[in-house]
Image: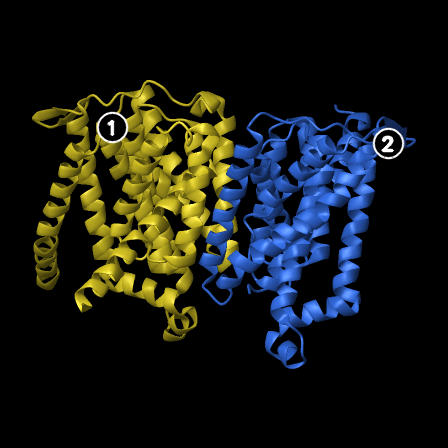
Chain colours: A blue, B yellow
Amino acid sequence: MINIDAILPQVFNGIQFGVLMALLATGLSLIFGMLGIINFAHGSLYMLGAYFVWTWVRFLDVPGNFWLSLILALPLMAMVGLILERFLLQPMYGQPVVYQILITFGLMLVIQQGVGLVYGTIPLPLGIPPLFEGEINLGLLRYPIYRLFTMILGLAIIYAVWFFIERSALGAIIRASAEDPETAKTLGIHTRRVYTWTFALGSALAGLGGGLHAPLIGGLQHSIGTEILLICFIVVIIGGMGSIRGALLGGIILGVVRGIAGVFWAPASDFVMFMAMGIILLFRPQGLLGRGGTR
Amino acid sequence: MKAGLGLLWEGFFTEFFPGIKMAAILIFLYFVLPSKMMSAEIVIMALPTLAFILLLGYTGLLHFGIGSLFAVGAYTAGILLARHQAHILMAIIAGVAMSGIVSLVMGYFCIKRGGLIFSLLTLAFNQLIWFIIFQWKSFTGGPDGIWGIHRSALHLGVFSINLKPTFNFYIFVIIFFVLTFIFVRRLIESPFGKVLVGMRESELRATAIGYNLETYKWIAFIICGMICGLGGTLFALHQEYVGEHLANWFTGGEIVIMALLGGAFTLHGALIGSGVFIFLGDSLNRFTVLSKAGAWLFVLGVIFILVVLFLRGGIYGGAEKAYELFKKK
């Protein structure tokens, strides 16, 4: 009999991990929804974000450097996204889907191995920022502050992105360019530029996820992106492609299920992910909150 | 019945000489390449690449789970050979059948969603199979893999061939490769293959004509899996060892790269791709600069992106274009 004290922290860890995954999946979903591209390089962008933060933390040796680095990494990631979209993805629009996947697959390889060449393959540690060290008493359990913080910040960012896309005027332009590019063009929207900025936003979200997760990983390695990419894919398959709320729901479900399964038998935490995916595919192939049909 | 036999006879004639020619070229390759082990590896890796091309080039499905099916074949043959001293041919047949069964199940889930989701699902299944292989230590050896596979004598009734010498094994591999190649080519030329190509060109049109696309895709998927399994069994014999890394998605990724490099729209692309990939990888790794921390993979990634951007037909397509330009002048 396993008591509640063992399970509760895992549920919390699950939610925290799920929110981080949802943050990444939001970027992935956004890129898919607008550009119709599945970004295999998303995991690599996550990894790149973590490395950017690590580099800035090393470079700026002042108090609060982690936060500064996180903020500095965002425009950098957006810039990487801009360049990638402009030079590699734009020639792919209107081409068969497989080439779009293949180009991001090649990109994944290049980014990952490039980082491996620059930083080496030895794990690089990144400590938890001093401001959020230690634990907090939540009544039922004591929980690390940093984890709680990433959970809240992640949720806030996902909400902000959702609000931006679904409620703001700029978001309306983005949605219009995705749903009906021809009409959007007639109305004077520079759709190509919208795609570019959407990809940049997605990249920045991936980088932010990487930066936030970095202190919890223990050691950064150039291969951390691949496993995350797979989890991200499963999150969007469960939640439904192209839906931000679906990404959040999928992420949290996956995180909690993983966490609880891990209490009973550690390897099971990976196995249940696939189980969840299989079940969803059998009964609801478009995902929990998916719009149905493939684009 | 008579017509069927006639077709078979005709097929035998049209494929016999090209098959012999291909085998001759492959044997020639054996004496040219710097490493004898490499030539066998090239031909073996061309098998999953061929399977991948059958799916991508002729059916339009991007399969990222090739590695796991390859590994299923390798593990089945490896376990049978190492623990049960099975006959080599039996082990190969079992490996192919096992990969077929696994693809049957995998295909059932993956075919439901076309296009992008298909690729994601095959990738996810790939990792699931890798995970099972990695965790099931008592059966698959987990991270240790399977040792003790011996490619000894192949008994064929009255006589037996020793497969231990590299050249004998190479001939053994070539026979399988050429037969598979001919099979795939016949398949593509058959009405079944025409439906696949028609489906790739326009799913809507093929549906309107009245073909059940899911069934066709599923069958193609299973055939692809069986060819991968064959490659895996031969690989197990070649290395005399099977490790879990085979099932990891990077193996599948390498095969994707090989296929695109060689040319994804022609069956010849399989052999060209695996040849160039393995030869380049082997020679580039010898340079001191490039052997550092996977620099070879970095170079490979760059080449791969360039191929996807500018040379869709791969090396074969590029050579074809160059030849046509040359002929015009």
Q: Residue at x 17, y 65 (%)?
A: B327
Q: Amino acid at mark 1?
A: Met
Q: Quadrant of the N terminus of chain A?
A: top right
Residue B11 position within the rendered picture, expressed as x and y whole percent measured from the top left: 12, 56
In this rendering, do the residues under marks 1 and 2 share a single chain? no
Q: Quadrant of residue B74?
A: top left
**CA neighbours of label 2 inside 10 A, class few (<14), some (14 to 19), many (20+):** few
Reading the image, the residue beneath label 2 is A131
Q: Amino acid at mark 2?
A: Leu
Residue B80 position within the rendered picture, expressed as x and y whole percent measured from the top left: 32, 26
**B212 and A183: which one is in front?**
A183
Reading the image, the residue beneath label 1 is B37
Residue B150's tag is none
**A80 and B35: which one is in front?**
A80
Given the image, what chain letter belongs to the residue carrying mark 2?
A
Q: Quadrant of the C terminus of chain A?
A: bottom right
**A23 and B190: which one is in front?**
A23
Residue A288 position within the rendered picture, expressed as x and y whole percent measured from the top left: 66, 55
- Asked if residue A232 is positioned above or below residue B210 in the image, the reply reads above
Q: Is residue A275 left or right of residue B27?
A: right
**B308 and B169: which one is in front?**
B308
Given the image, what chain letter belongs to the residue carrying mark 1?
B
Q: Is residue A91 left or right of residue A147?
A: left
Q: Give the structural element (helix, strand or loop) at label 2.
A: helix
> How much space separates mark 1 and mark 2, taking CA atoms?
58 Å
Q: Quadrant of residue A198?
A: bottom right
Q: Quadrant of residue B288?
A: top left
Q: Can residue A287 be seen here?
A: no
